[in-house]
Image (spheres, rainbow, N blue to C red):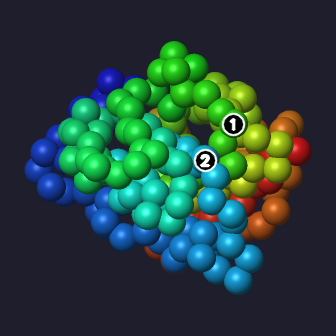
Amino acid sequence: MIWRKRFYDRSYRRGTVPWDTGVTPPEVVEAIEGPEPLPPGRALDLGCGTGTNVVYLARHGWEAVGVDFSALAIERAKGKTAGLEGVSVLRGDVTRLSALGVDGPFDLVLDIGCFHGIGRDRRADYVREVTRVARSGAMCLVWAFGARGMRRWLSMGVTRGEMERRFGGAFDLVRVVPGREPPGSAWYTFRKR
């Protein structure tokens, strides 16, 4: 995990953060503003980066909490969220939300590229924490790289089978939509039982 923190902090320092576009993805916009929008409630953005989606959610009536382990990303997120009501961003480990004082219940858990980068040995901790803080009926929206082409030692990427197996104890998989980029990525929509 140490090398991941260094990688992300170095990337934020250099400004080479292709994952942090500053634009809320259309899949999230559809969930919030689409034909069947989620009613505003409490949202948790895991791997929130510089807070783009926390700001978007707050501007659409949500109380939003963002968590990221990059100190530089959280510093920038605090700048973006300054003055917004019902928003907080925390630096910490998404697999240890209870240690950060993050408690539910949340109506929406959003993860745009965080879960797939967590080491396989810590993914069960992530799912346990998400399960703990998600309200019954909550939506969990996860975008992740596919496992195809990823080096095993990087432990990045997921398969649909892994997502179903890891989340299946407490969540129903509602929908899988192939991502646009990179090939093999997908949006997973879960609903907490």
User: Which residue type does callout 2 highlight?
Assistant: Arg
Residue 136 relative to residue 120: left or right:
right
Do the numbered discs 1 and 2 sit on residues whose CB atoms are within 8 Å? Answer: yes
Callout 2: helix, strand or loop? strand
Q: Position of residue 31 (x, y in %)?
A: 64, 70
Q: Residue at x 26, y 53 (%)?
A: 80
Rendered view: 31 above or below 164: below
Left or right: where 166 falls relative to 83:
right
Local packing at callout 2 (Cα closer than 10 Å; few below 14, some 14-19, many 20+) is many
The image quadrant that residue 167 belongs to is top right
User: Looking at the image, can residue 45 be seen?
Assistant: no
In the rendered image, the quadrant that contains the N terminus is top left
Q: Which residue is mark 2?
A: 42
- Report the residue at 73% width, 46% height from top: 162
| Residue where numbered disc 1 is placed | 105
Residue 10 screen position, x and y as percent? 17, 41
- Quarter of the image where the C terminus is located: top right
Spatial separation of the CA atoms under disc 1 and disc 2: 7 Å
Name the kind of residue labelled 1 in the image: Pro
Q: Is residue 69 left or right of residue 31?
A: left
Total tally of numbered discs in the picture: 2
Q: Position of residue 113 (x, y in %)?
A: 48, 53
| Image point (54%, 55%), residue name | 62
**Is 154 situated above or below 138?**
above
Dot 1 or dot 2, earlier in sequence = 2
**Position of residue 56 in the picture relative to residue 125 (left or right):** left
